[in-house]
Amino acid sequence: MPSKTREQAAHDVACVLPDRAHDLARLQILIDDSEPVVTVVGKYNHGKSSLLNELLGRDAFAVSDRRETVRLSDSVHQGVCWLDAPGLDADVGSGDDFEALRAAWLKSDIRLFVHAAKEGELDAKELLLLTELDADRVRTGRQTLFVLSQVDQLADDAALQKIGDAIDRQMPGIALNAVSSMRHRKGLDGGKKLLLEKSGMPALQAALHAELARVPDARARETALLFGEIRDELQQLRAARQTSLDLLRKTQQQQKQDFDRSLAAVIDKVSGDIDAMLNALGTDHAIVPDTAKDAYAITAGKLERAHIQIAYSRACIEIDAMLAGHGVIGLPTEQHTAAKSLNSVMIAVMGVSVKFRKDLHRMFCEATGRERMQREFTHYYELSADRKALAAQIADMEAAIAASDNAAAALRTLETRA
Ligand SMILES: Nc1nc2c(ncn2[C@@H]2O[C@H](COP(=O)(O)OP(=O)(O)O)[C@@H](O)[C@H]2O)c(=O)[nH]1
Ligand SMILES: [Mg+2]
């Protein structure tokens, strides 16, 4: 598959599972299936670069007493890619070193953990890394060979024994692979077989070759493992998202049903009240205008208007309380006017005009009037902040599920072409 398509597919999966970005990068390397990669890890100046040069049989990597290896450098030799990584104690917080370490970690099939003999036992940082590497071996099958380097710097075999014992107490059962790059080089240059043997390098080389032979199997296993883990995680996430969506939709439906019912009930109730009030009235005095001499007098017209107005207010208050209970409080912002007191759903639906008998009758006692209230309050209900937020949540969840499906398809693309 073109690497562009593959990158896009890996990206689609990582969008949904950002924590898997590293695994996906590793999978792409595994799919590439290039030469097995051997990486050195360990602290700086412990002889990592020298060791690689001896294993390769040529000076491919820079050896120095100073901090040398910052960038990752590689050399392909006899079907193996050798990677020289910066020292563990490199300033991992800063760009190059960190990138190089990350790349080394990502690419390597086999790690050579190098520890200089003269340093004695492992320090906390080395122990931690070795433990992590071991956990990674258990998970992905990638191997780490421990290498006790620069053993020529020890006084005698007793000193070597002592350090070996100390390290064994720290990492029980660990194979030491004691080597000296210096002896190996001298042995080669001088044609001294015994020195070559004593360098420990042939034994390490044999151990390494055995591990290299296992790389194809290990890679197949790791590929299957990573695909399996990611597939499972995608499925679980998809299922969890579907459950959330179902729940949100159910809530949305339930809320709407409750609202419809409450609204119908309150309209029934206030319509009944208004109907009873209107039926109990006698002659309509409200439309008889008051004259100037009635300014301070109580007239039948004023009483009638007050009576009607109070009944109407009561009905409005009951509806308003029901609406507030369902989160219908203000108007949607795009409907706001400069007069703040008018920005309410009650006013938008009921208007501000003074109501007379025929108005109340039309609004509350005729089917069309009640249907209009039901329809318009429902309209504002759906525009209320909570309802809109819920609708937005549902839309987000639907998008998340679509992304999950997209990721699952992308993973299958990666898997079938792997
Ligand atoms: N005596 C001795 N010195 C070594 C050996 N291997 C490396 N060195 C020296 O240790 C220093 C650091 O080596 P290098 O390979 O650059 O270490 P790195 O920083 O871990 O890559 C250099 O001066 C090397 O010459 C060895 O086996 N014996
Ligand atoms: Mg180096």
Image (spheres, helix red, strand yellow):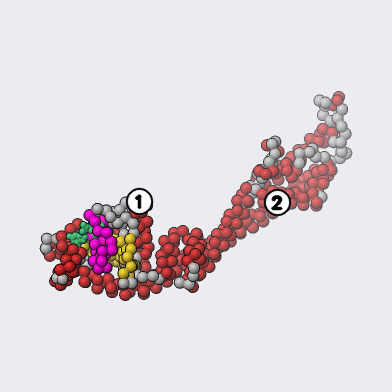
Is residue 296 found left or right of 393 in the rendered image?
right
Disc nearest the viewer among 1 and 2: 1
Mark 1 residue CB less than 8 A from any atom of ligand 1 = no
Quarter holding the C terminus is bottom left
**Foreground residue among 218 and 139:** 218
Residue annotated with mark 1 = 93
Residue annotated with mark 2 = 378
Residue at 82% over, 43% down: 359
Whether the magenta-drawn stretch holds residue 54 is answered as yes
Q: What element carries label 1?
A: loop
Is residue 337 in sight in this rendering? yes
Is residue 270 found left or right of 196 in the rendered image?
right
Residue at 88% over, 34% down: 288
Is residue 160 found left or right of 400 in the rendered image?
left
**Three-letter code, disc 1:** Gly
Q: In which quarter of the image is residue 23?
A: bottom left
**Foreground residue among 35 and 350:** 35
Instruction: Count the marks.
Output: 2
Q: Vertical placement of 84 versus 203: above or below?
A: above
Q: In which quarter of the image is residue 361?
A: top right
What are the residue bounds of the magenta stretch? 43-65
Whether the magenta-drawn stretch holds residue 337 is answered as no
Is residue 125 in sight in this rendering? no
Q: Residue 251, image x and y in percent?
A: 60, 56
